Image (spheres, grey):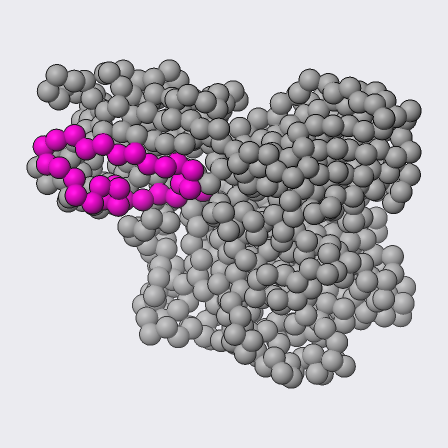
Amino acid sequence: MGTAHPDLVSIAAGSRERIGARVPPVPVAWVSLVMVAAMSGCGGGAESPATTANAASPTAVSTAAEDVFEARRRALAATNPVASSGSVTLFAKGAYGSGVQNWSWNLCNTNLTTRLGRQTVLYFNECQGGDWGSGGYLHLDSAATDAATLSFDVYLGTQPAVTAQQIYLSFGDGSQGMLLSSLLPAPKANAWNTVKLNMVPVLAGMPFQDFMLMNASGHPKFYLNNVVLSLGSGGGGTGAAVTVKVDATAQVHPISPLVYGVAAFDNTAAVLGALNSPINRHGGNATSQYNWQLDASGRGMDWYFESVPESSGATPAGSVADLVTANRQAGAQSMVTVPMLPWVATLGPGRSKLASFSVAKYGAQQDTDWQWMPDAGNGVRTDGSFITGNDPRDAHVPSDPTFQRGFVDSLVQRFGTAAAGGVRYVILDNEYSIWHSTHRDVHPQGAGMDEVFDTMRRHAAMVRAADPSAQIVGPEEWGWGGYLYSGKDLQAANWTNPPDRAAHGGMDYVPWLLQRIRQEEQATGTKLLDVFSLHYYPQSGEYSNDASTTMQRLRNESTRSLWDPAYTDKSWIADKVQLIPRMNQWVTQYAPGLKTAITEYSWGADNHINGATAQADVLGIFGREGVDIATRWTAPAETSPVFKAFQMYRNVDGQRNGFGETSVQALAPNPDQVAAFAALRADGALTVMVINKDLTAARPLTLELANFGGGSGTAQRWQLTKANAITALAPLPYSGARVADTLPAQSITLYVIR
């Protein structure tokens, strides 16, 4: 996209020694249209081996502490939330409250309590490490729902104003943190100062489980006492009643089980098993430069253009084979990406990493991988200009269909053909229209329509020859801009007359590609594409941890861009995306018979109930609208509400039961507030998934049932709320073909009606 393309280096935190980690959205400017796009990270493999929060920024505050204690958090994740009334004592009268642990880290004091005057109090001497390098940390074993007010007394010593400026309060991922000084603008010296903090806007609907007081700057020393969390009703009363009309004989069609897929890379078999997910995707930016012979990948723009080993050993395709093995253990199909870029990663002696933009070779750069590989630069000179003319051989070796044939052959030899239970889906690379950005170290020029078609044609023919029964998937484009413009046009950024589009009859990029592939198939008799795949990330910031009221409401409605022909997207897109109908129309017009797949998507907020309600809405939409395959980027953490949203559909009771397999009509008056989906199950039950998106209000619900049963019976119920636990509620008798219930605010309820 020229000045409009996303040539920005993104930095994330986590484990980089694997394919598939995604970075946060990258800002992109569409200059001529005066739009700002928050692009997806495009399946980036760009994560560092450890947290790299260097600056004293509130957005980075909670990362270090949360990474340090992630294992303990998982082990002690709440299963029985604290009741939503009264109060919870964290520390008072010299003792911790029930279920409270002190997880403070990197303090200079060994004893976490001390005597101050006549009282035993908490003591925090944060004299070690840099900014965010130490902190006080109180953790509740069971999360408290409906947190109202957190009160505590703090003693700040002789320079209280200075000390208050040094302490940052955080309450975990997705919450709103703040400096203590913002709560105590004029603290008293050598005295106790009382703080009362309204937790409702801070948590934005999340449960309370963690209270951290970190050294934002300097090395504060302070004391804490009487830490008490009061609990409120947590709701905004009762909202307007809603009636959902279900007809068991209308709009009947099968739901593909493959819409419940993910991209799981860690603890894969267990994660897929707990989700009962039937398909797992190997993909992302790093797969574009995967060298199967060395089991190594190139991280491109996502992480300093480094080539890195995917495993400690040198088994060809070892990490991919391990993933496929884990998928098979879980009973899940595999989607494996075959690179099409002309260069793939190579390694140095002893499987050491290599850099495309070596500082020693190409000079000083704006940023380097200072912690893990200081010689690896970001390819941007100190004056802001890009390094051009670099030698791809610095960190890569050539690749072509013959080289990649060895990759496919190795999978067939190990697992058999797709027809014999091997790898069923072979994906042709990843997001070609931004190769010139993500992988500019090896493909600095935007890929034009002809180049993309020819590359797809040659690699697809290779896959078909290697395994005629494999399902070939593409083109895996990243989002709205990548549907309409080739990389050549995105780089040119001439929106009034895009040169590549003009040279191809004025057609949009992806439809032209589908048409050209079908023409080639008809001319040669070789099937080149079986599944038409795209990626989609909402572009108003939903793909983030933002749980502000504004963002929650955006998540509630922006799922409409998947299906609603009348909905104008609120982001820079400012158009009617109607993604699934659009994909179906393109298939009907240009390549009849192709299956459709959305192989990357996410609405973010994994650790918030709003992310869960959005995810449940998306899964229902995929089933209702007839998508063939969908794989979320990535598999959510097992303790997260979003993980449980998947389980509501696929494993609600731990016995792999859930939503039905045959979609039927469910009509809700306003899906931005309450969304509903219905399906018949193989055991004869009618299942209805009802999602109350309202941030504060419970909703009286009536399910009106048509053409099912005798009009009376029993409805079993399972429910997920912001308490972050799936609960089996008491069965609900019904009569008159009406089921009456009340939906809590921000809840997902599955009704199994007989």
Q: Is residue 190 above or below residue 492?
A: above
On the rendered image, what quadrant is the C terminus found in?
top right
Horizontally, is 568 left or right of 122 in the view? Answer: right
Identify the residue shown where x is 49% and y is 31%.
234
Query: Residue at the location (19% across, 33% down)?
Result: 193
Horizontal relation, residue 384 to residue 641: left or right = left
Q: Quadrant of the N terminus?
A: bottom right
In the image, residue 183 lies in the stretch drawn in magenta? yes
Q: Pick whichever, 459 or 227, lies toward us.
A: 227
Q: Bounds of the magenta span?
A: 173-202
- Please state the horizontal and vertical placement of residue 16, each as a whole percent of the image: 47, 46
Above/below status of 587 relative to 748: below
- Answer with the quarter of the image where residue 342 lies: bottom right
Q: Is residue 484 visible?
A: yes
Report whether 648 appears left or right of 522.
left
555 drawn magenta = no
Residue at the spot 53% in from the left edge and 64% down from the top edge: 37
Q: Is residue 279 above or below residue 563?
A: above
Front residue (pair 485, 168): 168
Residue sitting at 63 percent across and 51 percent down? 557
